[in-house]
Amino acid sequence: MNQDSLIIENIKGTLTVRLTYGDRQSDRFDALLETIQSWCHQNQCGKRTSYNIFQFPTYKNLMHFLLTWQNYQV
């Protein structure tokens, strides 16, 4: 079975990331974004600013996010 990977793109010069995933329109991606949003809220490390964009107040928060989610696969 082929696993899809979460793709995290850092928007150059900012503390913002854009997330993409195999099939962007899938219910799985929507559920994953909700999970990530909840994680950010629980860890007080960032916020969701649009459908697939997350922003972080500090570089440390961004690194915490990247270390947690960079190898996520479904």
Image: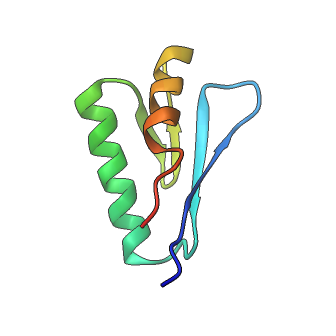
Left or right for 30, reference 5: left
Q: Closer to the camera, 63 or 16? A: 63
In the image, is residue 3 above or below residue 21? below
* Image point (45%, 78%), residue name: 26
Image label count: 0
**Rendering coords of residue 46 (x, y %):** 41, 29
Do we see residue 24 in this rendering? yes
* Farthest residue, direction left: 42
Q: Position of residue 3 (x, y in %)?
A: 50, 73
Q: Residue at x 60, y 25 (%)?
A: 15
Residue at far front of view: 1
Q: Nearer the viewer, residue 32 or 72?
A: 72
Q: Position of residue 5 (x, y in %)?
A: 55, 63
- Seen in the picture, residue 45 relative to 17 is either above or below; the reply is above
Q: Is residue 74 above or below residue 39?
A: below
- Classify residue 25 as left or right of residue 45: right
User: Residue 41's image quarter?
Assistant: top left
Q: Please tell me which residue is depicted at 52% across the width and 49% down the height of the picture.
A: 71
Q: Is residue 58 visible?
A: no
- Left of 29 or right of it: where is 18? right
Name the outermost residue toward the right.
12
Residue displayed at 52% across by 53% down: 52
Q: Which coloring applies here?
A: rainbow
Where's the C terminus, which quadrant? Answer: bottom left
